[in-house]
Image (cartoon, rainbow, N blue to C red):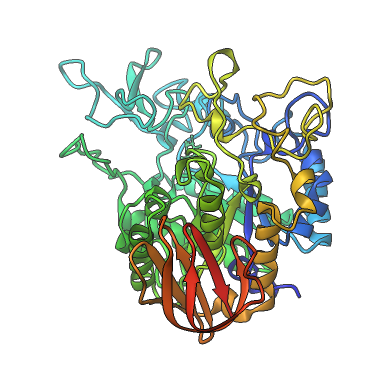
Amino acid sequence: MRATDSTWWRDGVLYQIYPRSFADASGDGVGDIAGIVSRLDYLEWLGVAGIWLNPTMPSPNLDWGYDVADYCDVHPDLGTLGDLDRLVAEADRRGLRVVLDLVPNHTSDRHPWFIDARSSRTSAHRDWYFWRDPRPDGSPPNTWRSNFGGGSAWELDARTGQLYLHHFLRQQPDLDWWSEGVRDAFDEIQRFWFDRGIAGFRIDVVSELVKLRDLPDDVDPGEFARHADAEETHRVLRRWRALADGYQPRRILIGETWVMDAENLASFYGTGTDELHLAFNFPFMFASLDAAELRTVVEQAEAALPPEAWPVWTGSNHDFVRFPTRWCGGDERKVRCALLVLLTLRGTPLLYYGDELGMEQVEVTGGAARDAADRRDGARTPMQWSGERGAGFTSAGAEPWLPFGDYAERNVEAQRDDPGSHLSLVRDLIALRREHPELRSGSYESLPRAPGSWAWRRGDAITVAVNLSGAEVGLEGVEGRVAISTDRSRDGDPVDGRLRLGPWSGAIVT
Ligand code: GLC
C-alpha cells in the first residue's frame, strides 16, 4: 500500500542520507548520487517513503556543502544534474520521494553574488548581504557571535573597509533577507528544483532567517542568542508555502528550527497549513533517554502544535553524536527501545542513515578529521553495507573519505536476514505502520505508567510501552496481542490486563 501523494510525508518514514557517505559508485572513496541510485532497492525494501539528501550543490566544502557556491547545480564530487534527474526518476519508480537541502541563510564567499557584493560599495548585490562600518573605536558593529568558534560574527573586508555578517564560518556570509532581490532569487531556485521533480526541501537554520533589522546587541550574550525577526521570517515561510502548494503533487518544506520550547516550535507551522510542513524538534534530540524527559517533550509538542500540524521525531543527524552512542552508550537494548519510540509516536520518524543498524559514533581523530568547522566527522562515517574490505561502500582498494566504523560486525548484509537484528526490527516496525492506519495517523495519548517507563495510546486500539529502566515494570489495563516486542521473544503473545516489561524493553500491543 502506498501513501497518497498529498500525505506521503505524514504517513511514511523519512530517511536522511549524507551523500558523501552513503554509497560510492565511482570508486574514489567519496559517496555519490549514482551510489544512492544503486541502493534505492534497499530503501524500498526497508519501506521508507522519502529521502532527504544533505547538500548536493557545488561548494568549496569548508562546511561540507553548507557553503553553497551555486544553488542550481550538483557538486562535481557527487555527480551531475543528469545523475540527480536519474535519482529522482529511479526513486519515483519505487514510490520514493527525494528532498534536497536548501541553505538560504548564507552562501559561500565564492558564490558569484558575494564576489560581486564585496567588489564595491555600490555593486548590484551589495545589499544582498550585511555590510556595516566598524564602531568608532574600531570594534565590530554589534556583539553577535559566530556559531562556529564563538568569535565575532563580523569580518572586515579590506577592499571596501566595511564588515560583513556571518553566523557560521567567515567564508559563509549571511544573506540579508530584507532584500527583495534575495527573496526573488530563492523563489527561482525553488522553482528550478521543483520543476525537476524534487519533492521538497529541508531548510537550513530557517528559524534564524530574517535578521532583526536594526541588528541590536545581545542582551545576554551568554544565552543561546536569537537574532531573527520572527514576524518577517514567518512572512517568508508563508511565501514559500504558497509556492510549494502551487505544485502538483504539493512540495514539502521541512525546517531546521533552532528553538527550545514547544510554543516557538509550533509557530513555525503557522496555522498548521500555511508555513512549514515539518519542524525539527531539537528538545527531543537533546533530552536524555529518560522516560519522563522524553514524555514531557512529546506532551508539550502535542499540546502546542495546531491541530493540522504534524510532528517529526529525530534521534540522530549529521551535526550531533549518533543516538546509539549519545542516548544508549552502545547498549543494544536501549538502541532497540529508542527505535521503537521513534517509529511509533504520532508524527513522521526521520531515520539518519545507519540508525537502522544501530551505527555508533566513530572516533575520528588527527589527520582523518575533515570537518574543520565543528568536528562532526564521527556522525558522518560511511554506511556499513557489508563486512568486506570497503564495507560495500567503496571498492576494496579505495581509501574512504572518512574512516569506517565497526563495519566488520555491524552491517546490512549481516543484519538483513537475522530476525533478531536492529535492521529487522526497523523494517518490521515500518511495515506495521503501513499495516495499521492508527499507528500512522491515530492520535497520541499518554497512559498511566510505572516509574522509569512510558506508555501511550495511538488512536483507539494500539498501546505502545517502553521501559527505560533497569527494573521490571508492569502496566495495567492493556488488552490485545503483542505485535512487536523489542527483544522479539514476546511477538504474538496475548496480553490480558497486565503488560510486563523487562529492563530496557518495549512492546506494541494491537
Ligand atoms: C545547519 C547544518 C549544519 C551546518 C550549519 C551551517 O545547522 O545542519 O551542518 O554546518 O547549518 O550551514
Q: How many marks?
A: 0
Q: Locate the C terminus by quadrant.
A: bottom right
Is residue 442 at all visible to an observer of this figure? yes
Q: Nearer the viewer, residue 359 or 185?
A: 359
The correct choice, above or below, for 332 with respect to 137 in the image is below
Q: Nearer the viewer, residue 297 or 134?
A: 297
- Residue 489 percent across, percent down from the top left: 64, 65
- Residue 138 percent across, percent down from the top left: 20, 15
- Residue found 79% across the figure and 44% down from its top: 413
Q: Quadrant of residue 60?
A: top right
The correct choice, above or below, for 107 with respect to 326 in the image is above
- Residue found 54% across the figure and 48% down from its top: 186
- Residue 501 percent across, percent down from the top left: 49, 67
Q: Quadrant of residue 429?
A: bottom right
- Residue found 40% across the figure and 35% down from its top: 127
Residue 144 lies left or right of residue 54; in this view the side is left
Q: Locate the N terminus by quadrant.
A: bottom right
- Residue found 43% across the figure and 50% down from its top: 285
Residue 84 lies left or right of residue 500; in this view the side is right
Is residue 310 at all visible to an observer of this figure? no
Q: Nearer the viewer, residue 373 or 194?
A: 373
Q: Nearer the viewer, residue 103 or 118?
A: 103
